Image (cartoon, rainbow, N blue to C red):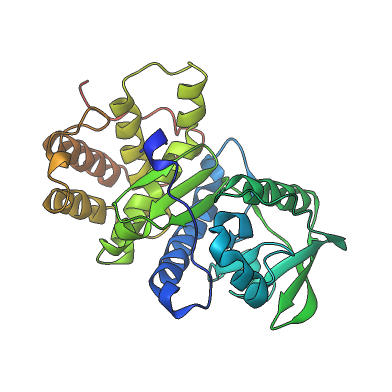
Amino acid sequence: MLLLPFVAAMLVSAPPQASSAEPLRAADARVEAIADRIARAATPWCAERAPLPGWVLHHLAEYPASLRADLVAIYALDKGPGIVAVAPGGAAAAAGLLPGDTIVAVEGESIEMGALPTRESREPGSRIEVAIDAALARSPTRLTVRRGGDPREVVLAAPAACPTHVRIARAESENAFADGRYATFSAALVARTLRDDELAAIVAHELAHNYLGHYAARRDGRDRRPMRQQEAEADAFALRLMAAGGYDPHAAIAFFARMVTWNPLDAIGLGTHYARGKRLTALRDELARMEATPDKLNWAGTMLAWPPRVTP
């Protein structure tokens, strides 16, 4: 779904070593692995591209003030962002970066932390990530990281791919949203998935919103269609993204069909999505079209030419 104000408060990825954070830490790793794989596979279809470092970062400003002293003592998050997860086979893993590393300098320049807000905020961390992305976009980048108290240098070469940034939120509600840059997933929603193919359905759906520019188009008034039509487009594109990444797109139908067991309101759609029956029918129809196309993954440059066959 697209970002709504009431979900904007879902914050904070898991710190990488605290035992109480193990479920969130595992969720970060699962989501990042899937997102990285999809982003690399979908690169020919994205008009805009950005460095794909293959990591999830966390930042001191994201945490309550009561936890910050411990986070500084353990992870040195006052010096820069910490790495929560790395994608297997991704750029960060290839550079030798590990969960628990803290990035303290980029090309020899210390991370500019700025003033910490009193309340939890994503903004300072987002600013730092934009600056790191800008360096990675120019060339392979020398990073100084702190690992176990010792500094070390690595060179990170991040490939250009679909712009992809994911986050896990500490929230008890099952929710996910896309804001044009980040795709955010509640740990509760991730826990509802039975296997990675089902999780890929959720990840691909939110990435589809960002790749298709839905949030910006609605924000700027360029797309005034009912939101449910954007959701239907994201569903259709997500099936293609799943298949390209090597995930079973049929898992999307299994997951969304089961969603009503913990979210009864999903059956009627609530205005942002089509009612469950109509949504599942559209997914099945799109799968049938994919399977009827011999070269179903060779459709670069045509991502906007396949509106889902859903009657408003």
Horizontal and vertical percent for residue 300? 50, 39
Residue at x 33% of width, y 26% of height:
227
Horizontal and vertical percent for residue 188? 31, 59
Quarter of the picture holding the C terminus: top left
Is 147 left, or right, of 48 in this rendering? right
- The answer to which of 213 and 174 lies nearer the viewer is 174
Is 40 left, or right, of 6 in this rendering? right
Quarter of the picture holding the N terminus: top left
Residue at x 32% of width, y 38% of height:
236
Vertical side of 23 occupied by 164: above or below: above
- The answer to which of 171 and 27 lies nearer the viewer is 171
Vertical side of 202 occupied by 268: above or below: above
**Which residue sits furthest right?**
108
Res. 296 visible in picture: no
Horizontal and vertical percent for residue 224? 39, 16
- The answer to which of 287 and 122 lies nearer the viewer is 122
Is 301 left, or right, of 134 in this rendering? left
Q: Picture quarter containing residue 274?
A: top left
